[in-house]
Image (spheres, rainbow, N blue to C red):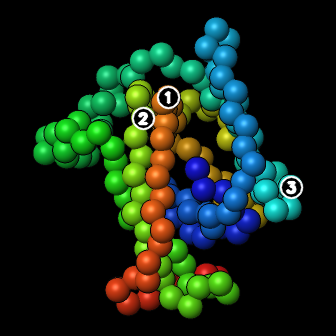
Amino acid sequence: MACGTTARRWSPTTGLLGLDARLATAEVRGDKSAGHFAFYFEDAQSGQPVLRGRAHYQPRAASRVGLALMRRLGLEGIHKLAANPWVSLKVINPIGPHLAGNYEAMTYTENKQNLLRYSDPSQDRLEFADPRYQALQFQPQFVQQMSGFRFVYLNPKPSSARPIIRHP
């Protein structure tokens, strides 16, 4: 999860919320017997809370989520996802006070178990501590549970693409 201090972009049509990436201190505690896990993120530099919440623990995936994902990705996309031991994604850093141009880096994520389900407002809670985030009224659509999580972020290199993302 990327934590930040200023909202980068909120798009109600796509449902994506992007935050400036910053170093964060986090705690995630799960209690399978109680049926939930709780999490807390704070900005490592300022110590200010960024995000906290609680989510229902679900032992297995719901079939309706799998079907919705299959419709979205198609058979070829599902096959590619199942065939790769990791998910790779290019990340582009914004131009700002510390970077004169866009930089891009590859990321690789792997986990032993990955479960995706629809968010249930009666059991799942996501709360932004900063009023700027609260004003966005962001509501999660999905909850992703991962175990055995590993993440690699390669060193960024200057992007060959024209400048596309600027710091506000």
Q: Is residue 149 above or below residue 161?
A: above
The reply to whether residue 127 is visible in this rendering is no
Quarter of the view holding residue 85: top left
Q: Residue furthest left?
A: 76
Q: Which residue is mark 1?
A: 147
Q: Is residue 53 above or below residue 8?
A: above
Look at 86% across and 61% down and name the residue there.
Answer: 46
- Kind of residue at disc 3: Gly
- Kind of residue at disc 2: Asn
Foreground of the two, 73 or 81: 81
Give the CA distance from mark 3 to mark 2: 29 Å
Look at 52% across and 74% down and name the residue there.
Answer: 93
Q: Are marks 1 and 2 in contact (CB under 8 Å)?
A: yes
Relative side of 97 to 43, left or right: left
Q: Are marks 1 and 3 in contact (CB under 8 Å)?
A: no
Relative side of 168 to 41, left or right: left
Relative side of 5 to 146, left or right: right
Q: Which residue is mark 3?
A: 47
Q: Which mark is residue 81?
A: none
**Looking at the picture, how far across and down is residue 79, in whole percent?**
16, 39
Q: Residues within 10 Å of mark 3 (few under 14, many from 20)?
A: few
Q: Which residue is mark 2?
A: 111
Look at 68% across and 63% down and name the residue there.
Answer: 22
The reply to whether residue 59 is visible in this rendering is yes
Identify the image quadrant of the C terminus: bottom right
Disc with the residue nearer the chain's start (1 vs 3): 3
Look at 48% across and 41% down and name the residue there.
Answer: 150
Give the CA distance from mark 1 to mark 3: 27 Å
Which SS class for mark 3?
loop
